[in-house]
Amino acid sequence: MLKMTEFAKRRNQLMQKIGSNGVVILTSSPIAIRNNDCLFSYRQHSDFYYLTGFEEPEAVAIFAPKRKGGQFILFNRVKDRDKEIWEGIRAGQKGACKQFGADESFPIADLEKKLPEILEGREQIHYSLGINKDFDQILLQALNKVRGRVRSGMQSPFAFVDVEPTLHEMRLIKSPAEQMMMRKAAEISADAHIRAMQACVPGMNEYQLEAEITHEFQRNGARYAAYNTIVGSGANSCILHYTDNNKIIKNGDLVLIDAGCEYYNYASDITRTFPANGRFSAEQRAIYEIVLEAQIAGIKAVRPGAAYSLYHSAAVKVITQGLLDLGLLKGSLQDLIEKQAYFKFYMHKSGHWLGLDVHDVGRYKIDKKWRMLQPGMVLTVEPGIYISADLPGVAKRWHNIGIRIEDDVLVTAKGNEVLSHKAPKKIADIESIMS
Ligand code: GLY
Ligand code: MN
Ligand code: MN
């Protein structure tokens, strides 16, 4: 778990950025019903968590720079012995201040009453309208109350500013402590991929490999996957976000596993593809080598000062050349790249930011140009080639080969660090682990 001082530092940074006339308001994630009276496991909103470390639902956090009663106000659930017997301990108002560093804490039921006085005297409300419709109403009502008092000399806020761009730029650069969390998440996930490779035999069901993955996550303290685990064998390896995971794995199939755990809310995101029987066929090997070379070229393009787009173009070049060499594309390299001829085999981008969310926040372009990479950014590098059986004009021997290789890469001052390096990806290493 990150230290509370880290959360406090982030709050102070954000307050400095918005200035003393602003106020930031964040709401916790809603509770989600799975069915009838059963709930999905609760996961705090990443923005809310980033600034508070507070993981209970039904909470509103307010940051009001230079406010007399204190800058960090947390509205949260009250302690309730009956509820706590059934659902677990709550921090309550005392805990909000003592454990989470709130300057003031009020019961969530007092929100409507208290909100107007917090808004009074502020000029900008930094809040993302339109996401939490219930709270939007509460906030607008509070704002109207303040407007009603302007004749008595009250300053009423006159601007709504989306807090996300400022906050998300902060989240994009990972601190040393965050890097540690992500390193650990990637290490656990790498072990899970190794476990699945070792457990795999033809005749198993895809969900049995998912169980191996989940087992390895949970026994290492990572209760949750950062996204739904993908175990796609044979034809399913060509379905990019396949999550049914319920088919029998056949001899001769490839198995594509895209799985990453969350460690103290920090995500990892790793894909490995391996032959169900432990030996790549000639065709599988040929495609695999192209994807691996593209992925290594992509990782090499991740360094400070390089444009974000560079690693994708590096991967595209290798993939197009590889498909050309195998006769799966015909023409000149430059022409095929320009016309995006590779797209029918490789239809997604080579990666995304990674952090508290698997598809993490932060802009990719600034002033319409791909931004430069900076130390502390973490991104995935995940090229792939997918040849489904219905792809026209491709000989049958290539059918149902879906390969993606995905690593988590931290930009460092000198270049990069592959956080997920422990997951094997060379053909010889995979075959040896599976033998
Ligand atoms: N696991 C989702 C992705 O790779 O983007
Ligand atoms: Mn990914
Ligand atoms: Mn992935």
Image: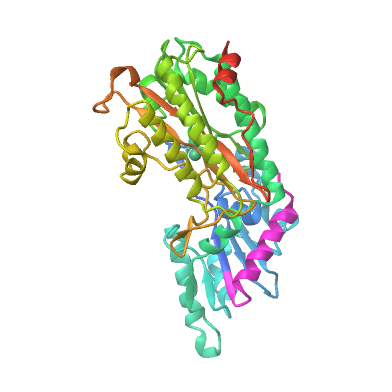
**Does 305 sit left or right of 40 as displayed?**
right
**Does 19 sit left or right of 392 as displayed?**
right
**Does 189 sit left or right of 244 as displayed?**
right
Q: Residue furthest front?
A: 332
Q: Position of residue 262 (x, y in %)?
A: 59, 38
Q: Nearer the viewer, residue 278 or 415?
A: 415
Image point (38%, 28%), residue name: 325
Image point (64%, 38%), residue name: 419
- Relative vertical location of residue 323 with respect to residue 203 in this rendering, above or below: below
The image quarter in which residue 73 lies:
bottom right
Display colour scheme: rainbow
Q: Quadrant of the C terminus?
A: top right
Q: Is residue 375 magenta?
A: no
Image point (67%, 42%), residue name: 181
Q: Position of residue 28 (x, y in %)?
A: 55, 53
Magenta range = 1-23
Q: Nearer the viewer, residue 209 or 140?
A: 209
How many labels sit on residues?
0
Q: Quadrant of the N terminus?
A: top right
Q: Is residue 12 magenta?
A: yes
Q: Position of residue 162 (x, y in %)?
A: 49, 66
Magenta span: predominant SS is helix
Q: Residue furthest left?
A: 392
